Amino acid sequence: MQYFEHLTALPAPQGSSVALGYFDGLHIGHQTVVRQAVEKAEEKGLVPALFTFRLPEESRIKGPRLLSTERKHQRAAGLGVELYMAPEFEEFCGFSPEEFVKKILIGCYHAKEVFCGENFTFGSKKSGNVKVLAQLCAQKGIGVTVLPLLEYEGLPVSSTRIRKALEDGEVELANALLGAPYQIDFPVRRGKGLGHTLGFPTINQHYPAGFQTPREGVYITRTWVDGVWYPSATGYGTRPTVNGVLPTCETFLPGYEGSLYGQSPVVEFYKYLWPTRKFDTLQQLTECVMDAAAQARRFFETEKS
């Protein structure tokens, strides 16, 4: 997949089939839009493409991010996208709907078909909706397919719903809506080494500004290291037992003894176990961590059987 960070004419002389949207998390609703664009490209001999955009970390236009940029790229490529363009929002946010069609869909993508969800908006101050998109594209001979919002358990699938599920510790629901386990892949930082002293060394990952955080507590996770998935236990919170102040994300990988400082291992979340607690002794803390690790091991053993 080719990736472009600025508005530019893309290598699609035969035309493209474009999925349009912000696609935060690339959840199952987004995947439906992207897959249909890819299928249409295959049917008509077009290039499968995706248009999205990037926002500053402090932006609240779309809410906290669910997925890192790298993971978003990987998932889009896995769906069959060949051309992926994601300019900064400021680069085109002043475009009128007419300019969006002329400069982006035609000028950049040579679009022949476009796909989006029914709630898609575009143009300065959201001045264009799917009806306007269909009208403008029809004038240029571009086909428009508008897909209804996908539902799960009777409610629309949305990034907002996924964020709420994570805030509530409903990891299974978040994973079902995402179509894949919720995951993080932030760089490992040096901690105070307390876990190592107590017999359960952990990797410490800090959520960057602008990312959605889960409910504070302990989770069953698994961690990808050196080509192997390790059942793991992850705690997210302020570590009240040791008088922590800032939230951290610490993961214990039983059986792994290497160093991951500076690396960005993928940690997938599967189940919320219990909220953050303040223990009277470090021994109680150790027993809690070991219990969570044992539950993680049993969880994935059951998954295999």
Image (cartoon, grey):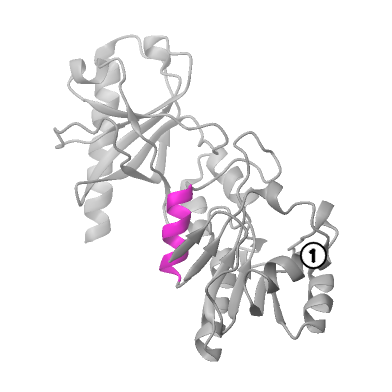
Please say whether residue 268 is one of the residues in the magenta stretch. no
Tell me if residue 148 can be seen. no
Give the magenta-colored segment's residue range: 69-79
Quadrant for the C terminus in the image: bottom left
Instruction: Determine which quarter of the picture holds residue 13.
Output: bottom right
What residue is shown at x 42% (from left), y 29% (from top)?
Answer: 206
Q: How dense is the environment of label 1, judged by Cα within 10 Å: few (below 14), some, or many (20 and up)? A: some
Q: Position of residue 195 (x, y in %)?
A: 25, 20
Dominant SS of magenta comes to: helix
Q: State the residue at coordinates (51%, 52%).
A: 173
Q: Is residue 124 left or right of residue 84?
A: right
Image height of 132 relative to 259, above or below: below
Image coordinates for residue 25, horizontal then vertical, percent: 53, 53
70 drawn magenta: yes
Which residue does the image show at 64% across and 33% down from the upper left? 58
Q: Which residue is mark 1?
A: 99
Q: Residue at x 77, y 61 (%)?
A: 121
115, above or below 275, in the image = below
- Measured from the top left, where is residue 38 in percent x and y? 52, 78
Kind of element beneath mark 1: helix
259 relative to 46, above or below: above
In terms of image quadrants, where is residue 100? bottom right
Residue 23 % position (x, y): 59, 58
User: In the figure, residue 119 lies in which quadrant?
Assistant: bottom right
Give, as a three-letter code, the residue at label 1: Glu
Q: Nearer the viewer, residue 201 or 83?
A: 83
